[in-house]
Structure formats: C-alpha cells, structure tokens
Amino acid sequence: MNSYFVYLILSIIAASIALGTYRLLKGPTASDRAVALDALTNITTALLVLIAVLSSRFIYLDVALVYAILAFVGVIAIARYLEGGL
Amino acid sequence: MIEQILDYVGMIFVFIGSLFFLFGTIGLVRMPDLYNRMQASTKTTTLGVLSFLFGIGLMQLQWMIKLLVIALFIVLTAPVGASALARASHNAGIKLWEKSIVDKYEERKK
C-alpha cells in the first residue's frame, strides 16, 4: 500500500471518530449515546483490520473478530437495560 | 501485473468504505432525532465496513476468507442490534422528531 494512501485513509477515519465522539459526549438521551457507540465500534473494527494489514500480522484479525462480537453483546445489553428488562 | 490491478481495486474499495464512515458520522451529528440518526449510522456499518473489509481482502488475497467471516458476522448482527435498540428506545418513551408523520409501531401498540 502506498503510504500517502494510508495517511489519507487514517485522516478520514480520524475525522469520523471525532464526529462520532462529539455525538457520544453531547447526545441528549442514553439511546443517542448507544447509537454513537455502535458506529464507533464498527469504525474501530475496520481500524483494527487496517492495523493488521499495516503490521502484516494475520493473528491480529482475531482481535477484530472478538471486538465485533463483544460490541454486539454490548448493544443488546444496553437495549435490554433501556427497555427495563435488566 | 494482476496483483497490481487487484491492489488498485482494493484501494478504491477501502477509500469508498472510509468515505462511508465519514458520511455516516456526519449524519450522526446532523440528523434531528434518534431514529434518523440511527438510519444514518447503520450506513456506516453495512456499506462502510463491508467495502473496507472487501478492499483489504483484495489487497491481501490469502486473508480473504477470514475477512469475509468478519464481514458476514457484522452483516448478521448489526440489523439485530439496531432493531433491538430502536424498539427499546421507542418503548422507553423517546419521542420522534415533530416533523415525522408516520409511526407504525405506535399504531400497532394501541
């Protein structure tokens, strides 16, 4: 991969994380924060895969997989809590 | 030669995916209420992550199967999570935007 291309992708992802963090901190209700957190975890999964490519370690993909699974469990737990079932 | 072409196609896919991250989070900041924000941010998940992972897989062809497993998992779980979260926050009493005109779930609950 071209290094200028990596810098471009990383700066776009950094801008997205900044916008998502703004909504995460400001969000009027808890559900807004949960939605922002969901978007941020998806971006982080992609970022972990990018780190795996840049350091060319195949084993780092497992980290991304486990992170995606834990993010799903977290969203379901937050939804149950908001509904009053937890 | 063919590796070079696959590298460039993968770069295009990765670029499209990261642009969708940016658009999804811009929608997250700009949209007026929770449900509109949710429909903007799920674009981040589906098109963004899928295109990103597929582009990386085109660059590193021997990683493609594991990347597709991650993508399949995200495709299976993201709609479930979004649906559960929308339903829970509707039941918790979060109002729609005042210019929204249709609310089928409210009609169904009556």
Image: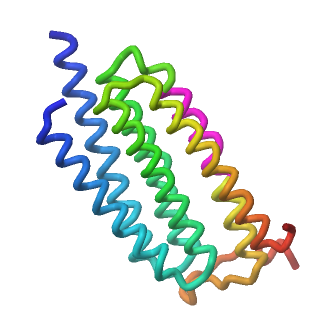
Where does the image place residue A65, in percent across and percent down from the top left?
55, 36
Residue pictured at 70% horizontal, 74% vertical:
B89
The quadrant where residue A79 appears: bottom right
Instruction: Looking at the picture, tell me which residue is in the foreground, A73 or B34.
Output: A73
Residue farthest toward the top in the current orientation of the protein: B1
Residue pictured at 50% horizontal, 38% vertical:
A64
Q: Which residues are magenta?
A: B67-80
Q: Main SS type for the magenta part?
A: helix
Residue pictured at 57% horizontal, 44% vertical:
A68
B103 on left or right of B45: right
A43 on left or right of B72: left
The quadrant where residue B9 appears: top left
Instruction: Looking at the picture, tell me which residue is in the foreground, A55 or B22.
Output: A55
Does the magenta segment cover residue B73? yes
Where does the image place residue B88, in percent across and percent down from the top left?
75, 69
Where does the image place residue A41, in percent across and percent down from the top left?
50, 54
Residue pictured at 74% horizontal, 60% vertical:
A77
B58 on left or right of B3: right
